[in-house]
Amino acid sequence: METLTKTSARTAKDTFPINGTDYIEFYVGNAKQAAMYYQAAFGYELIAYRGPETGVKDTVSYVVQQGKIRLVLTSAYEPDHEILKHVQLHGDGVKVLALWVDDARDAYNKAVERGAKSAFEPYVIKDDQGEVVLAGIHTYGETIHTLVERKNYNGVFMPGFKAKTSLRKVEGVGLKYVDHCVGNVELGDMNKWVKFYQDVLGFKLLITFDDKDISTKYTALMSKVVSNGNGYIKFPINEPAQGLKKSQIEEYLDFYKTAGVQHIAVETDDIIDTVGKLRANGVDFLYVPENYYDDLLDRVGEIDESIEDLKSQNILVDRDDEGYLLQIFTKPVQDRPTLFYEIIQRKGARSFGKGNFKALFEAIEREQELRGTL
């Protein structure tokens, strides 16, 4: 899922053209502190702000950006505000996956005609930098897709926000754009939401993983990946499968209380350098035992990176027919074991690290066991 990346070439099969991801909005308990976390830990630059000083009295939002990734961190003041009710139920989490389109009105009308539930009808916001058209549709859980048309806007983010820069010195860690965004849904709902993306947004089924592909001794899950016409938007959708113990998907649903965004995969050109900087900033990652690397080259073939360098950062490798990828997962980035991040570097591979699933899920199970939720 690539942010603000547009090409002129579109296939005739792309029935719902999307240029890329516009932004991802989190509802959080304290937006100011969340913005500082993303600056200090992940190297995002603060670029915009909206709140009482800009005329908005009930909410506050900070916009941070790195590469083509743009995050909006939003909180509210009154305990009965819908944003704080959302945080009370779910904890900090993703509310909006915003999609950049050429014509928000047309995209909204098509989506609703095809069966989408409206979140809000198209409306226009303006300032002296131009105008932005916004519309919204519901997806799994309480997550929504905001459709953003900004071809007539030249401001820092959108009307209502003012430019704001980081007071601290921020050093980027090399994050470029969102590779994919994963949703966890309840048992039996995966195919329903795959069909939603196919029927409403014209996505194609990219790949399917069943409980034989994604399982350990104790737990299992099933996943299907859908992608839009130009391939910039990729949404894996997971549901739990029968296992001896509680799976990571069930744990997520128990803590988040509904379906929602499980993790966001962000791409880098140098994962060893990026992960080293993130660790130095205090970001905590899942641990995979060193014996994972004993037969790594036998499994994936020749790679450019040093095994010792990969081992030092606990980075995993997998290969498909088109190349290989390197990946690592953070631990949850808030108190509840819900949202986390994947750092990924692709060297030709277009897959999702199927060869690493067992090692990764065993690592997650070790964390679940420590929490007493396995």
Image: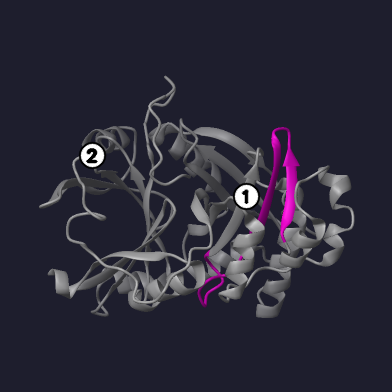
From which residue to which does the magenta span run?
315-339
Quadrant of the image occupied by residue 342 = bottom right
Q: How is the image coloured?
A: one colour
Quadrant of image for the C terminus: bottom right
Task: Mark 2: give few (<14), some (14-19) or many (20+) Cα within 10 Å.
Answer: some
**Would you name the residue on which mark 1 appears?**
345
Q: Could you say which is closer to the camera, residue 34 or residue 129? A: 129
Which residue shows up at 23% across the image and 79% down it? 78
* Secondary structure type for disc 2: loop
Numbered mark located on residue 151 in the image: 2
- SS under mark 1: strand
205 part of magenta stretch: no
Give the left or right position of residue 319, taking residue 332 as reference.
right
Q: Is residue 272 above or below residue 154?
A: below
Task: Report whether residue 329 is seen.
Answer: no
Query: Which residue type carries mark 2?
Result: Lys
Residue type for callout 1: Gln
Q: Position of residue 146 (x, y in %)?
A: 31, 49
Q: Is residue 343 left or right of residue 147?
A: right
The disc, 1 or 2, on the residue closer to the chain's N-terminal end is 2
Q: Residue furthest top?
A: 12
